[in-house]
Amino acid sequence: MVITSAATHPDEQDECLSSTFASRYVRQPIPKFKMPDHSIPKDAAYQLINDELMLDGLPRLNLASFVTTWMEPECEKLILASLNKNYVDMDEYPVTTELQNRCVNIIANLFHAPLSEQETAVGVGTVGSSEAIMLAGLAFKRKWQTKRKAEGKPYDKPNIVTGANVQVCWEKFARYFEVELKEVKLTEGYYVMDPVKAVEMVDENTICVAAILGSTMTGEFEDVKLLNELLTEKNKETGWDTPIHVDAASGGFIAPFLYPDLEWDFRLPLVKSINVSGHKYGLVYPGVGWVVWKSKDDLPDELVFHINYLGSDQPTFTLNFSKGKPSCAKPILSYAFAIVVDKKGYKNIMENCWDNARTLRKGIERTGRFNIISKDIGVPLVAFSLKDSSQHSVFEISDQLRKYGWIVPAYTMPPDAEHLAVLRVVVREDFNHGLAERLAADIDKVVKLLDTLPSPITTNAAHVTPITPEPNQKINKSDIETQREISSYWKRLLEGKKLGAC
Ligand SMILES: Cc1ncc(COP(=O)(O)O)c(C=O)c1O
């Protein structure tokens, strides 16, 4: 690499150092995968990296994500002020620790943990719901194993029952911590875990049933109350005491404000732990999640580590140790939010998200081309599928929308509904009425444009192998069969082009 650095050309030093564009310093490419042999000035490095980052999508137009993309400027000041703190060091940063504890209590109270006036809640701040879920899952696994050992029963085949619609973090938990994942398959028109089937799958090795408050795929809340009733009956019949975990990653900051009478949390006897993402509808930038347990008894003591090398006895129950970067600021921000945006404020924000989701939904319905898959209650999002995908697919719509700046993911549903491919728009606080109308108009433009383009199905037909009937076989396909066939064409044609649903 040849660089015209300040050091090699002192005459040009000022000009170079104050230069805006790094190309003035760099005449040859900088190695991408090896450390360079020569350094470059820091402002040039800044410019180069910043220029490359400009090609990332605009976070606020990323409608694939549930994660917060806008916060008040005051919050950004708090983040900057805490950037260099490692908040695992509770002795050094006791106030940060105290704010985290306040957040745990605020959240536990929001979820109706049975706490007396003097009692503090049991829970911890995490990097996100994924870490929270690993911790909750580990606690269930350890409790189950301890009980089985005490009963002299085998404890080497733990399983967990979930819907097939669970987020990938549950699959990770199962694989990393050697727990069999028993998934309740979805069915046509019912895209969340069926509590009846879930309870049927429970056996003596089930460490817990995990229900989702706000399915990643459709935003729908699973029926935790019915699950609790059915599981209570099964526990009575069998003598087991299979508990429930609620993955409220998205719904945990929605349900308490919009649906206060919906019973899904610690009001239900079998719900022993709940996770929620602070960085989703907790309205804080990425890097914070929470897990809370109903009581001290639900978190086995042996999972809590005590360290004293940072200055005092510090109980820790997390997968990470050091937590710096903005994540330190997150408990502070979460607390700031809880006091600045009171219950009424949260309710307003969530209602507003829903108003915008309804505007978008109406606009999409007006095109006449889509079926709406998401429900009117749940996480404010619109999931929709094409009524007719025989010529063009939701994946093409997703691609075309990128040209307007929108990032809208298209994906196929989990088993046994994988024939259905959907688009999903997550409505966050920073998505407004005007943007909803604009997006609906752009979707309309895209479907009309696709009408004028040749179908990849017909143009690429030579590259895919259609399902050919046996000779003399009578073809009498149902709508679902046709849909399945078309979906499988699309899947093969567009392999690798899908955006993930996160
Ligand atoms: C239902 C559900 N659970 C867990 C997660 C993982 O959350 P996080 O990104 O906070 O780790 C997600 C993320 O979208 C989710 O939707």
Image (spheres, rainbow, N blue to C red):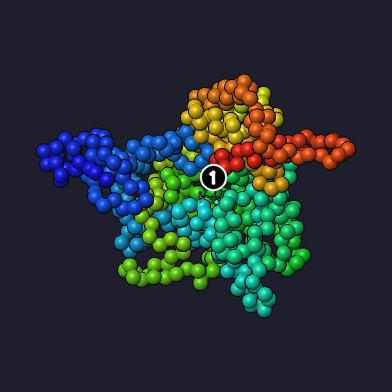
Residue 394 or residue 440, whichever sits in front:
394
Instruction: Give residue 326's position: percent from left, percent from top.
Output: 37, 49
**Residue type highlighted by circle 1:** Cys
Instruction: Give SS at disc 1.
Output: loop
In the image, what residue occupies the spot 52% across and 61% down?
Answer: 135
Residue 15 appears in the picture as rendered = yes
- Residue at image point 19% right, 43% down: 5
Image location of residue 203, percent across then percent down: 72, 64
Residue 373 drawn above or below residue 449: below
Q: Are there few (<14), some (14-19), or many (20+) residues within 10 Å of tag 1?
A: few
| Image quarter of residue 269 | bottom right
Q: Name the residue under label 1.
A: 502
**Camera-side residue of 233 and 61:** 61
Q: Nearer the viewer, residue 73 or 27?
A: 27
Q: Residue at x 59, y 56 (%)?
A: 171
Residue 355: x, y in percent? 56, 30
Viewer-side residue, 167 vs 29? 29
Q: In this view, does 186 lie to the left or right of 14?
A: right
Left of 144 or right of it: where is 103?
left
Q: Which quadrant does the C terminus fall into?
A: top right
Task: Answer yes or no: disc 1 within 8 Å of ligand 1.
Answer: yes
